[in-house]
Image (tube, coloured by chain):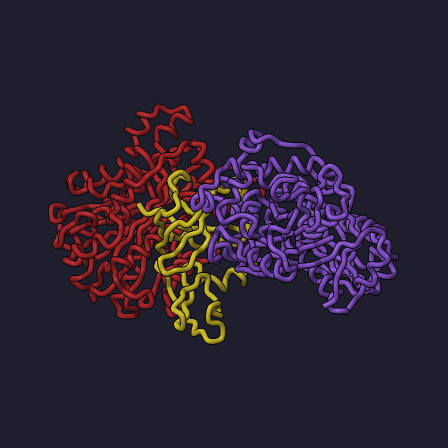
Amino acid sequence: MGVPRFWREIRYRYQLIGTKCSNCDSTFFPPRLICPNCRGAGKVEEAKLSGGGEVVTYTVVRVPPEGFEKQAPYVVGIVKLDEGPSITSQIVDCEPEDVNIGSRVRAVFRKIDEEGPAGAIHYGYKFALEQ
Amino acid sequence: MKVGITGHGAYVPRYRIKSRDIAIMWGQDPSAVEGGLGVIEKAVPGLDEDTITISVEAARYALKRAGIPPGEIGALYIGSESHPYAVKPSGTVVAAAIGAGARMTVADYEFACKAGTAGIQTSMGLVGSGSIKYGMAIGADTAQGAPGDALEYSAAGGGAAFVIGPDDENNVARIEHTVSMTTDTPDFWRRDGQPYPRHGGRFTGEPAYFKHVVETTKMMMGETGTKPSDFAYAVFHMPNKKFPERAAKTLGFESKQVEPGLVVERIGNTYSGSSLLGLCSVFDIAKPGDRIILTSYGSGAGADSFALTVQPGIEKKRRLAPLTRDLINRKKYIDYATYVKYRQKLVFAE
Amino acid sequence: MRKVAIIGVGMTDFGELWEKSLRDLTVQAGLEAIRDSGLRGEEIDALYAGCMSSGIFIQQEHIASLLADYCGLVPKSATRVEGACASGGIALRQAIMAVASGMHDVVVAGGVEKMTDILTEQTTMALACAADREWEAFQGVTFPGLYAMMARRHMHEYGTTEEQLSLVAVKNHENGAKNPHAQYRRPVTLEQVMNSSLIADPIRLLHCSPISDGAAAVVVCSKEKAKQARSEPVWVIGSGQASDTIALHDRKAITTMNATVVAAREALRMAGITQKDVDLVEVHDCFTIAEILAIEDLGFFEKGKGGPATQEGLTALNSQISVNPSGGLKSKGHPVGATGIAQVVEVVQQLRGQAGARQVKDAEIGMAHNVGGSGGTCVTHILSR
């Protein structure tokens, strides 16, 4: 991922900032310019999310894509955030057996990947099971 | 103007490896190793953790306790000897992650294990002079021990963050005074590009650690007109358990003053995080009015000493973020093979 | 709109075709289709080619020009169509619309993918481009991972079992064993499937369609031109296409592909028929769970009953509804851009009675269902004798 592409999303990834449409009261993450419900009639503003959520579904990736070889096997899930939107993320700090549909999770700040030993390091959100 | 710690935060990764499992690997006597260093197990960062991610977690907890808007942080310093980039500050990533504003100053610090306390001193100066309202000082490391070297038993990952602000009884503690000692003493170093540090063996004791820690602590007591019994707690830099215990004894502190801060036994030496995590551990139990003396040590060499008085604010703030002992007790054991994989001591095909 | 016929079909073998380049594959399939049609090459007015990721697989874009050139079709109009794994199906719909509108009389719709010139990890990364790169792939999720999450949720909501997921593969291999073009032409047992290695829990190796090279092409034409056809023309009686959110996490329901529901509704309404009238359907079984979702979302079985229906044999060859008589993506292979066209090649051959050992008896109406990504695109066609 090129430098500008990652850089322009830093705030949203690091702080879990999405958008909210004040017209229909829906919250979106990642941020959207247009509310898919209201389209032109929508009023979209930034909204910081709390980081709390629930596991909707998950899997254990055992055949990783390029760049994630050292991490496999790892748990990836869809987390429904408390504010409404669902996002895809790794679920960490636990054994795969501990993850269930419905488990409560909380956002943590981790390394996502790096472009080799000399390349840029990408940081972002992952989710840890609430104890 | 007097300044204080408005909020503190600690972070320890969840993985642990026992000294005895490392000892067995290298054909050493496990009991002798445990007994010699006093380190039972150490904290190991996961593959997706580094000094920056550790700093972010600690900083977020510190902000929770401080209860201030991140935009009011005017300076942020991370002291570490394992910054992920040799050039590109860790501090800017952490500042972005905690939602700090653009109007602030940031620089990364290195002074072996006392880079974090150096950041505290700088923040004290900026806050105390009225240049900024709040500063954030972080000491964090994912220290590397060379395979088979003595340091492999203790080199660990972890960190602590402190919001430094104007003196206030709602703070966690007031910083009464700070004093430092600095000499050119080459006891431990790492050349640029090298993966592991080198050290002077027994030279790291008397002429290095003990000389600086003991003399600086004496200077602190001299300049503040105090004696060991005036303090409820004494926290020293912890390369292992023996060094701080011996320094404390030499200075006239009792083990009950030193015990609560001796986190090294269960998490190892977190380098720039070491004495700061010891301080956070003391904050788990300290009461308003308690006086604390802390002396960090950085190879190269130097020591920063602080005298603190706990404020009434600690009672409300203590539980706004995880207690240090809960972080220490949250653990999953890994074996040497997993440790080597996580610490990237394997040569991967790139 | 004019009536549209398909009068010629052709496809290469699907598999790891080391000796054949993207151009070789396309020319082979195209030549076969035009010869099968009874028309001459000069009578082709336009070409639509589906190809998902030539840019990543072989660093080649501008496929339209490349293929028109190597197929000897210049200076006719050529368009490359991309909709991830639905590229082929979308190319066909474009060809149909071109003829139905009267813009052209004879249009070739083809699909091709050359996936084996790079390493598997790079292929996995290329396929992940069909997902949301920034917010799904960036986090380390793979395509098997996305479908695995659908599978787990489907198991949680409807009690679908791993055995039912595995029986889809068993059935499709049984069919594929009778398909001379298939990548895998041998049956597999339930034990083999359930013991194959885990890719992304609960999806196992033998639940996944393979990485394949291949091309397929069909000749689409007007009723007038169909009079010149060598074989009985097959008529396009329904076509539907729909979109959905690119990311799985933004779907209204993780266990329903709404794009399939909408596209199917449109195609069936256009054809003036219901599911009961369909004799066979080629569905997009990139992973076995995808076939279970497809037969539910196309309306052949109630939501949640896809697993039991498979287990009871209701989707086997010449059962209640023959699903994937070709062997599906699982056994036949899945050269991404070619799949949508290859499905239609099968339907046409079935309706003509040319399917040999795979023949669906008295096949009158057949359907093809092609999906892009994790369901962001769906295109479906209904053909009739």
Residue at the image point whose x is 79% and y is 54% from the top: C233
Q: Quadrant of the N terminus of chain A?
A: bottom right
Residue drawn 39% across the image and 46% down it: A101
Residue A78 image point, x, y percent: 44, 51
- Quadrant housing the C terminus of chain A: top left
Q: Is residue C186 visible?
A: yes
> On the picture, is C115 further left or further right than C149?
right
Question: Position of C375 compared to B330: left or right?
Answer: right
**Vertical relation: C134 (above or below) B130:** above
Residue C333 lies in what quarter of the image? top right
Q: Is residue A93 above or below residue A40?
A: above
Chain assigned red: B
- Drawn colour of chain A? yellow
B86 and C72: which one is in front?
A: C72
Q: Nearer the viewer, residue C2 or B136?
A: C2
Residue in front for this viewpoint, B234 or A25:
A25
Task: Say left or right for C35 vs B291.
Answer: right
Residue drawn 76% across and 39% down? C356
Quarter-of-image position of residue C236: bottom right
| Res. B79 in view | no
Name chain C's colour.
Answer: purple
- Residue B111 on image: x %, y %: 37, 51
